[in-house]
Image: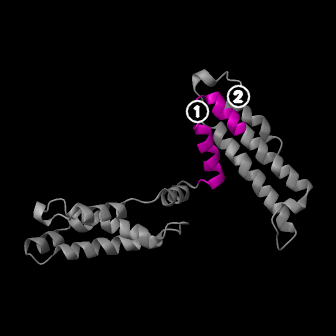
Amino acid sequence: EVFLRSDRVLKIVQSGACSQHDFREVFRNNIEKRVRSLPEIDGLSKETVLASWMAKFDCIFKVGDDDSKRPSRMQQQTLNSELILSKEQLYDMFQQILGVKKFEHQLLFNALQLDSADEQAAAIRRELDGRMQKVGEMEKNRKLMPKFVLKEMESLYIEELKASINLLMANLESLPVSKGSMDSKYGLQKLKRYNHRYP
């Protein structure tokens, strides 16, 4: 935006010394710098993100062209396909941006498929119960845990699992509860009692 609004660029354009290709290269260089500075995302390469941005640029730039200069239907379909990320790419990208772990996302997704708040909260309780039970079994039977180089890492792994479950509980408890579910049998506030199992 700073580049496009600068007096220098305005004078260059008015004198005819700046072409569409020049603008495209400036856009590509800026986007490339930003994309390269982003963290890696599983299933979504930086080249794909860069190609998607360039396809969007080309699409915007061609809006004012005459019908004779517009791409064919086949070319348009190819362009559109480049603009659309796959579900897996979007899934990984949003998880990275929001900082949501995959198991937390799946837990919330499964709960939101249910109609009532009671059913949603009950599904979350059952899922958390299962995860806490699994952690308890790992503490009793170390063979259920992944292989670690150092013995001390087993305790750290258990603590991280407990902290992750407790954090998810705290996030769920902080959500606003609708008036109709305040007296609900399975309200999210009921999750608080599970927190004390793993201090």
Camera-nearest residue between 29 and 71? 71
Percent position of residue 15, x then y: 7, 75
Residue 136 circle label: none
> Residue at position x 46%, y 59% from top?
86
- Answer above or below: position of 122 versus 164: above
Image quadrant of residue 58? bottom left
User: Which residues are the magenta region?
Assistant: 100-125
Do we see residue 199 in this rendering?
Answer: no
Mark 2, Cα crowd under 10 Å, few <14 / some 14-19 / many 20+, is some
Mark 1 nearby-residue class (10 Å; few <14, some 14–19, many ≥20): few
Tell me if label 1 and label 2 are in contact, CB under 8 Å: no
Choose mark 1 or mark 2, whichever is in front. Answer: 2
SS at mark 2 in the image: loop
Residue 4, above or below 16: above
Q: Residue furthest left?
A: 15
Disc sitting over residue 176 in the figure: 1
Q: Give the Cα separation between the discs numbered 1 and 2.
A: 15 Å
- For the N terminus, the image quarter is bottom left
Image position of 89 (left or right of 72) = right
| Looking at the image, residue 79 lies above or below residue 181 | below
Prevalent SS, magenta region: helix
Residue at the front extreme of this rendering: 74
**Residue farthest bottom in this picture:** 17
Residue, disc 2? 186
Query: Image quarter for residue 190?
Result: top right
